[in-house]
Amino acid sequence: MLKKLDIYIIKKFLGSFGFTMLLFTIISVAIDFSTKVEKFIEKDCTVSEIIFDYYFNFIWYINGLLIPLYVLIAVIFFTSRLAFNSEFISILNAGVSYRRIMRPYLIAAGLIVFSHLFANHVLIPHGNKVRLDFEHKYIWTHSDEMKKRDIHMFLDPETKVFIRHYRQHEKYASDLRLEKYRDGELIEYIKCKKANWIGPPNKWQLEDYEIRRFEGLNEGFVLGAREKLDTTLNITPEDFIRYKNQMEMMDTPDMREFIKREKSRGIGNTQIYNVEISQRTAEPFSTFILALLGLSIASRKVRGGIGLHLAIGIALGAIYVFLSKFAETFAVNLDISPVYSIWIPNLVYFFITLYTIRKAQK
């Protein structure tokens, strides 16, 4: 059962958190709008698209990145006021243990953590899809990356394709070679000078083609010089396009399926996507640690008051963000499990929090 003390602290916690989030949201939107307003004027985009397609989802995105920092600042802000008004001393003198005081902080942090987990894994990626589509259409019109030359991939475990060159605007592949295997033996070989994309589902038209089929020692040969052949290949033009922020546009179930498909096709390194999934879980759980860290720092009444506590909190928050980005880069570039590297900042701050709690005024 929640006591009056729990309800009082939880209200203070969530109220300060909401105020902090609102303040930083206004600042973020103002800065972003000032950098993109010229693009909005130049491009043929409506006010409705700017507000609902872009900024509505931009707010979710930017807050998703900064929620742990908001929690640390909010906890330090309202806890410092409690300490400055001698409320903490009164609570301790009433016989309430420091561990008991931590309970409402963990409850409020838990509400934020579970909301943040849902937002990171499902809600924000869906919003990013709309936001980034808007950016690619009106702002960063040349931000897509193409796999254009010497493309190797598996269409399925026993079908391999090679493409010498792919042209995005014309939607055709040149010098396509398709190899089909059965139990490790080549059974069909298709080669063509040009493969034109016709449309879904996976329809292509082959020009200047030749087909070879193998059955033991027997070989079948079809030559289509200067002829066209409509066929179906398990590949689409989207498989050649990679947006720089593509992983931000996929929710976690879609990303896991994407990783599985990329591995089956033997395409590139999927480490960055595994890191993103781990990051989406590690960041929300840091809220528990930062909430207790803010409590242990701000619960002591000091001469500097709220200003000193906020300065310490912002410095610790900035260091945490730096460690998180360092761990992310470390995990992407080295062949180690992202679960270990991404959780390093949380582990470091966990021990810092244990130390500050032991030293806190009780």
Image (cartoon, helix red, strand yellow):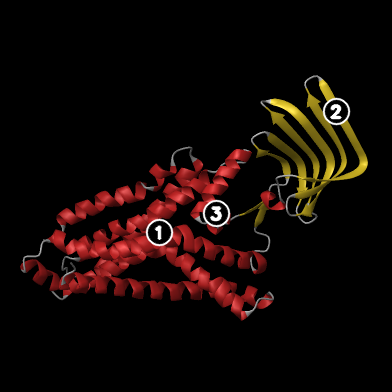
Q: Residue 214: horizontal and vertical position, in percent?
A: 79, 26
Foreground of the two, 69 or 280: 280
The residue at the point 43 percent across, 40 percent down is: 337
Is 229 above or below relative to 56? above
Q: Residue furthest right?
A: 226
* Of the image marks 2 and 3, the number of the one nearer the N terminus: 2
Give coordinates of residue 7: x percent, y percent. 21, 72
Would residue 36 appear left or right of 142 to someone viewing this image? Answer: left
Q: Residues within 10 Å of mark 1 (few under 14, many from 20)?
A: some
Q: Which secondary structure lies at badge 2?
A: strand
**Residue nearest the viewer, comparing 289 with 348:** 289
Decide which of 230, 290 is in the foreground and name it.
Answer: 230
Q: Amino acid at mark 1?
A: Leu
Q: Residue at 75%, 54% (x, y): give it.
A: 168
How far from the left and from the top, in percent, is residue 304? 21, 70
> Mark 1 vs mark 2: which is more N-terminal?
1
Location of mark 1 (residue): 117
Residue 313 appears in the picture as rendered:
no
Dots 2, 3 in contact, CB < 8 A: no
Of discs 2 and 3, which sits in the foreground? 2
Q: Residues within 10 Å of mark 3 (few under 14, many from 20)?
A: many
Question: Callout 3, which amino acid?
Answer: Met
The earlier-in-sequence mark between 1 and 3 is 1
Q: Kindly identify which residue carries mark 3.
A: 247
Residue on which the image places disc 2: 220
